[in-house]
Image (cartoon, grey):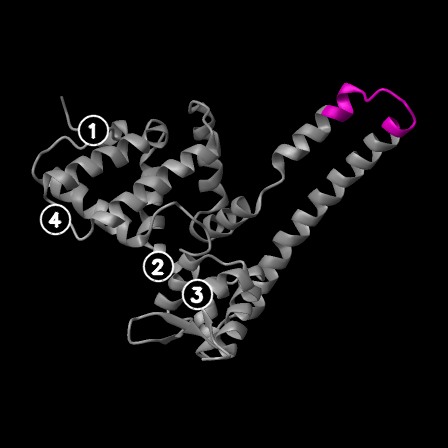
Amino acid sequence: MDDSFAIDDVVRRTGLTARALRFYEARGLLAPLRTQSGRRWYGPADLERIHRIVALKKAGLSLAEIKRLFDRKPIDLAALLSAQRERLVQQAAEITEALTLIDSALSRVGRGEPLDAATLCSLIRKGDTMMTDGQQAWKAVLDRYYTAEEQSHWQAAMPAAAPFDQAAYHAQWQALGRRIEAMLPLDPASDAALALVREWLALLEPFTRQASPMMWEGASRLYADMDNWQGEADPGFSKQVWDFIAAAAAAARKAGKDIGPLPAFMAPPA
């Protein structure tokens, strides 16, 4: 295996996480060699395939679409690339506008001129609208599952929620997801499962406080279809964890147990 690499080496060479590599393998995109002890080894062909996956994801293709390409199955590649190009053109226009504002501000500062409040506010507003890589990944996923009208509905509803630290909130989901995964397999009808469902819904409360029936049903559809987008955007937990929580919540409600905070339209009658 002189020309092969362990998963840690591949992580260092590609910048991907071990979790992403294992997820690609589970989706049938990679097939590394395994030792008798189960350790993964990636050869040159595997590394080339990983680079292709990364390149195609950057072009806007989902993992399911990439799998179809690898399997030489028909796909409307022109439509997919055209849609991605349109998104990139829009992002490029936003970046150009932001750079123009920054250059203007730097020019004034360089001449010793005071930076007026209007220009500074424009820079701040533009900075607030520029998306991180993670936000762009989520937008690409949401664009496939929600219409523009549905996304507008979300944007109108969610600002009423109390402000919170998004990074810290995501870290809480990651911690809960890891803890649940470590406990599996677990009987969905058990008391331990009920406690996890209550903890899950308590963490979800900023959303449930504002959720409409359309928002709740749309989110349920999105996460039920995680197999087709997990690895593109990170919700903080795996599909296995989501399926367990869904089953445990259903078992608890069937048994008439209180599972925690729910949207008002789902709450049982008094």
Residue for badge 4: 187
Give the x, y percent position of residue 144.
46, 53
Q: Is residue 136 above or below residue 4?
A: above
**Front-most of residues 141 and 75:** 141
Give the mark nearer the N terminus: 3 vs 2.
3
Which one is closest to the eye, mark 2 or mark 1? 2
**Front-most of residues 141 and 29:** 29
Circle 3: residue type: Ile
Residue for badge 2: 227
Residue at 87% in and 27% down = 108
Q: Provide the secondary structure element on which disc 4 rests.
A: loop
Q: Provide the secondary structure element on which disc 1 rests.
A: loop
Give the x, y percent position of residue 258.
14, 30
* Label 2 to label 1: alpha-carbon separation: 29 Å
Left or right of 251, for residue 119: right
* Label 3 to label 2: alpha-carbon separation: 22 Å
Residue for badge 3: 7
